[in-house]
Image: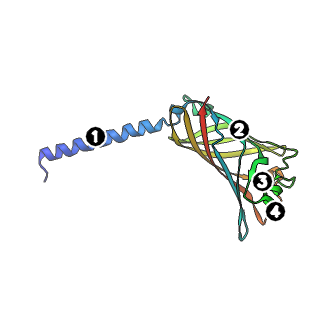
């Protein structure tokens, strides 16, 4: 049986450990609130996508041109907002034939619809450093609801980096050429870096 000194030391150690965990939790819980402000999405961000294929590798690529802003409301995350514009003509897959097809009127129709636009309608906090972003996605003149999940990866006084993921049904926007051989579901995987400004 441990003596009183040993027991007291153990209790003190446990108390300090618990206090540390509580303080760490409180500090981490304000990850989004502490990042309050308006940010511009940097060109160094990376917007990638993939479309599955039956018995094949599918299509993978990214977009080289985009712009946007987001604002984090520190008092009420629900009042935060995101505005994002993607230029589909900048699509890159590493294969000229595929890129030409994607830019054609069968998919993006960049000649008539040079922009794809997302405007958030609600932001819901899902964790200490994560949020669910719902909004309207407009492509080829059609607008439908879309949902993305964002997680803070790192931040400092001037910059913040988010990992954003989401899925979009391309048939909703008249881009269903190639189905069902190619999946109707487009998976987005984005690394967004924002700079205060």
> Counting residues from the N terminus, which is met first, the one under dot 3 or under dot 4?
3
Image location (x, y in percent) of residue 110: 84, 47
The residue wearing badge 2 is 67
Q: CA distance from mark 1 to mark 3?
A: 53 Å
In the image, taking residue 159 as reference, residue 63 lies left or right, namely right
Do we see residue 12 in this rendering?
yes
Per the model, the C-alpha gap separating discs 4 and 2 is 29 Å
Question: Are dots 1 and 3 in contact, CB under 8 Å?
Answer: no
Q: Quadrant of residue 11?
A: top left
Please tell me in which quadrant of the rendered image residue 41 appears: top right
x then y, percent, for residue 50: 69, 57
Which label number is shown at residue 16? 1
The reply, left or right, for residue 90 in relation to residue 191 is right
Q: Which residue is mark 3?
A: 170
For the residues labelled 1 and 2, the Cα–Cα distance comes to 47 Å
Please state the horizontal and vertical placement of residue 23, each as a whole percent of the image.
37, 37
- Give the class, few, some or many, for how many residues have Cα within 10 Å of label 2's Cα (few <14, many ≥20): some
Q: Are marks 3 and 4 in contact (CB under 8 Å)?
A: no
Give the residue number, with chain letter if any, for mark 4.
178
């Amino acid at each position: 049986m441990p003596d009183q000194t040993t027991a007291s030391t153990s209790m003190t150690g446990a108390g300090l450990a618990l206090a540390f965990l509580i303080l760490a939790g409180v500090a981490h819980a304000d990850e989004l609130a502490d990042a309050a402000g308006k940010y511009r999405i940097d060109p160094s961000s990376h917007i990638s996508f993939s479309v599955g294929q039956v018995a094949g590798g599918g299509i993978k690529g990214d977009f080289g041109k985009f712009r946007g802003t987001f604002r984090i409301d520190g008092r009420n995350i629900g009042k935060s907002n995101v505005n994002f514009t993607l230029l589909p003509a900048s699509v890159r897959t590493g294969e000229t034939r595929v890129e030409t097809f994607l830019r054609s009127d069968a998919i993006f129709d960049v000649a008539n619809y040079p922009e794809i636009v997302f405007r958030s309608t609600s932001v819901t906090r899902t964790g200490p450093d994560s949020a669910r972003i719902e909004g309207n996605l407009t492509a080829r003149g059609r607008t439908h609801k879309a949902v993305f999940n964002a997680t803070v990866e790192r931040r400092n006084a001037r910059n913040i980096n988010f990992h954003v993921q989401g899925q979009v049904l391309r048939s909703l926007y008249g881009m269903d050429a190639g189905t069902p051989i190619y999946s109707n579901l487009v998976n987005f995987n984005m690394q967004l870096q924002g700079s205060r400004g």
